[in-house]
Image (spheres, grey):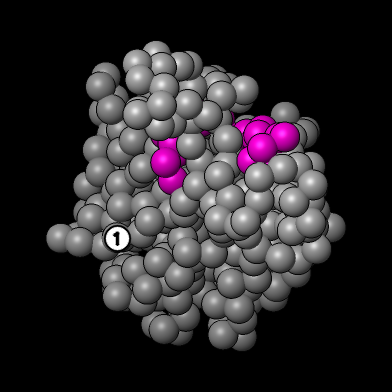
Amino acid sequence: MKLPEINTTQMLDFLVRLLNVPSPTGLADPAIDLIEKELASFPDLKLARTRKGGLVARWPGLRSDAPRALTAHADTLGAMVKEIKGNGRLQLTKIGGFAWNTVEGEGCWVFASNGRKVRGSLLLDTASSHVHGGAVNETKRDDSNMEIRLDAHTASAAETEELGIRVGDFVAFDPRVEVTAGFVRSRHLDDKACVAALVAAIASMAASAQRPAQDAYFLFSNYEEVGHGASAGIPPEVHELVTVDMAAVGAGQASDEYHVTICLKDSGGPYHHGLSNKLRKLAEENGIAYKTDIYPYYGSDGEAFWRAGGDVAVALIGPGVDASHNYERTHTDAIVATAQWTLAYLLSE
């Protein structure tokens, strides 16, 4: 088959807009809203929200005897206020699995309970070299030693509380998006790059007046980073689920930033051999260059659905992302290839 063209400019424009929308797990509604607004321009899609807050798009296909689903997640790493310290600064608790040193010095927003957004920075509590000397290098970066310095006139817990900030308020770290020389550098490419790939594939099919070969469902989940994103939201009639999430790039890995990868096993065990082979055959028939890989420290929304009792075949594909759960980077080629593979799957008999 000849795949429709991916509009790379539109894809990157949407990705940058999505990356700049704060959406830590538990506060992902603004990102889901943006995805819904983007998909609402395609009249063939039937959009609905799950009670959990995810977005499900249904696209009626040429057949409906073996519906398919794809999923990507809109929620990201982040934090919540654990304690308002006596000096007015904030101690945090993490949302998702990352190391504090990966966000040390980063700007952030605190979403106060009264609706106010307060700017701040995440710092070590012994950050000043001219005060603490060697302790700056020696202090362990852990929950007890990291704090948010607020950009507000506050030097006490009472003054911080007057801003409307309370324990349990959400914190989002700046993505710092930059697109240059074909690369996209940003926090939270996991998994917004894959959301953009799915939206680009949908737009490409719609522009070419094509429909999926089978009824297709797209779940944009909002709790993946804490392990239960797609445990609900996939309709029971679905036969296959393709999870679209980043590929792990680094020493010992086959993945790279320029290719789409199919993961055959991660920390939860092997994916469905038959569906994985079906996807590999589709890639080869359509000239999509891909890698195969295994991720030792990784879990996906597909596994969340399996653990919740989902009786479907599950496979995992996605663009290679360097420095995962850090300041991430991928290449446009990898995102485009992910969108092309998605198209090949949707259009296949």
- Residue carrying label 1: 178
Can residue 323 be seen from the camera position used here?
Answer: yes
Query: What is the span of residues highlighted in magenta in the rendered image?
Result: 85-106
Residue in the picture at 54% in, 52% down: 120
Nearer the observer, 315 or 329? 329
Q: Amino acid at mark 1?
A: Glu
Q: Is residue 108 left or right of residue 235?
A: left
Q: In the picture provided, is 289 more to the left or to the right than 321?
A: left
Residue 16, placed above or below residue 161: below
Q: Position of residue 113 (x, y in %)?
A: 79, 57
Placement of the N terminus among the 4 image quadrants: bottom left
Q: Is residue 256 above or below residue 183?
A: above
In the image, is residue 94 part of the stretch drawn in magenta? yes
**The quarter of the displayed image where residue 220 is located:** bottom right
**Image check: 184 left or right of 55?**
left
Q: Quadrant of residue 145?
A: top right
**Which quadrant of the view contains residue 22?**
bottom right
For residue 219, side relative to residue 122 (left or right): right
Residue 295's spot in the image, x, y percent? 42, 25
Residue 249 versus residue 19: which sits nearer the camera? 19
Residue that extends furthest to the right in the rendered view of this protein: 51
Q: Residue at x 42, y 65 (%)?
A: 15
Foreground of the two, 66 or 166: 166
Image location of residue 162, percent across then percent down: 79, 56
Percent coordinates x, y for residue 109 in the rendering: 58, 56
